[in-house]
Amino acid sequence: MRRSVFIAGLAAALALGVGLFGIGRKSSVVQAQQKASTTEVKVDNFSFGPVTLTVPVGTTVTWTNRDDIPHTIVSTDDPKAFKSKVLDTDEKFSFAFTKAGTYPYFCSIHPKMTGKVIVQ
Amino acid sequence: MSDKKKDELLHDQNNDGVNRRGFLKCMAWAGTGAFCVMQGGVLKSYSLSRLSELNTVDAKGELSFVQISDSHMGFNKPANTDVAGTLKAAVDKINGLAVAPEFMLHTGDISHLSKPEEFDTVGQILKSAKPKDVFYVPGEHDVLNDDGKQFLERYGKGSKGAGWYSFDKKGAHFIGLVNVMNLKAGGLGTLGHEQLEWMENDVKHLKSSTPIVVFAHIPLWSVYPEWGWGTDDSAQALAYLKKFGSVTVLNGHIHQTMQKVEGNVTFHTACSTAFPQPQPGKADSPGPMKVPADQLRSVLGITDVNYVQGQHALAVVDSSLA
């Protein structure tokens, strides 16, 4: 599992490297992003980083709580698109985004913490 | 050569009084809190270190109780790795009070992660306190994952809705409110329509001379909305209390003492028995504040409240664990 992620990362880095010296920087970055299948959001200092995350359809987003205080990841849509259990320090929550759209979410314990995933 | 001189100079300064002991003394004073007497909406406050200067009439009433808050049982990060120990210290302090309080209020965040064993531990520790009755309201940490079902099963006997209730003690009317349920994205604490309606009916028939004590976890006044330290619909709740001459609001959540007087209402927040949080806006986020272990107890505490019947006055003492 860890090995395959590493290889995928290496492949992406290679593609990026080739792109930089080849066709052009911008298009290759987009290509690298589209190839990526997982993306991480850090929950740190009572905020989500990045606050707005844009990913291609099919991406699994993983939130990791880096705070000393528990947090949750809860969709603000009705019905809720996703809802994590409470995440203690270093615990993770993942959700696979299979449909395009905008997915606002918040921490139901600290509702001032809000974020958004845009799936294209 | 010049470096050495610098070192010597620093050393001299330390000897001149800015030493560890001096600093500790300062911290202990800062964390001690205040003894407050409210008379007709005017709050008088005294440093706890000056309590001995007060006469017993001011210090004792016909009813006294203690507020503890934010025990966060289960928390084990560097800000305090022994929250059971500091809760026990709070109980020792309560048991050492000159006048045994009649009961205790716990203004929420009993547990850190709503785990059964965390609630059990708090229950065990509080059993050794002299006051046997404890009145609880939930904090957001007590209603994780199950919408407060466990909290209601444990503490909600005789309560309404998500756990709100009221009771009378020696002529004073106590109202326990729940403002940690159904929180909305971007919002603050919420009481909700059902609870507000209940509260309106609860106080409607009371005489305006009845002293009112409202307790809830999240502050019912805007302490610092940027960090979520306030309650969206608290103004409605306070509107129901306008006719009363004496209203005291006791909250937790922000892990530090703060006081405010607004007309007939005096607001107090209590220290945590577990870990301190930064002053509003004085840090990037309201996360636990790490203070050296030997200073921790000076920023944790209990609140001791005396009510003098017939004088419309409540005296609130915030006492540190140091």
Image: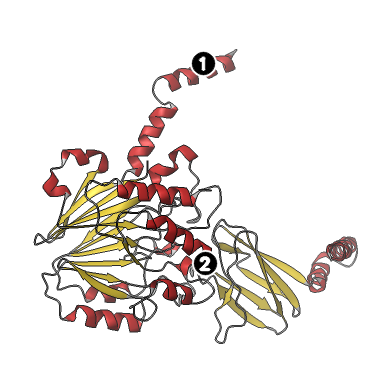
In the rendered structure, which disc, 1 or 2, sits on the residue that comes first in sequence?
1
Q: Give me the residue at 34% from left, 41% from top.
A: B30
Q: Give me the residue at 28% from left, 77% from top.
A: B236
**Spatial distance from mark 1 to mark 2, Cα to Cα?**
56 Å
Q: Report x, y in % for residue A100.
A: 69, 84
* Label 1–label 2 contact, CB within 8 A: no
Are labels 1 and 2 on one chain? yes
Chain of the residue under label 1:
B
Q: Secondary structure at mark 2?
A: helix
Which residue lies under the disc numbered 1? Answer: B8
Judged from this view, the residue extending furthest toward the left is B310
Which residue lies under the disc numbered 2? Answer: B116
Direction from residue B296 to residue B45 in the image, left or right: left
**Hey, which quadrant is residue B263 in on the image?**
bottom left
- Given residues B190 and B70, the one toward you in this image is B70
- Given residues B313 and B237, the one toward you in this image is B313
Chain of the residue under label 2:
B
Judged from this view, the residue extending furthest toward the top is B1
Q: Give me the residue at 36% from left, 33% from top.
A: B25
Q: Amino acid at mark 1?
A: Glu
| Image quadrant occupied by the N terminus of chain B | top right
Q: Report x, y in % for residue B11.
A: 49, 19
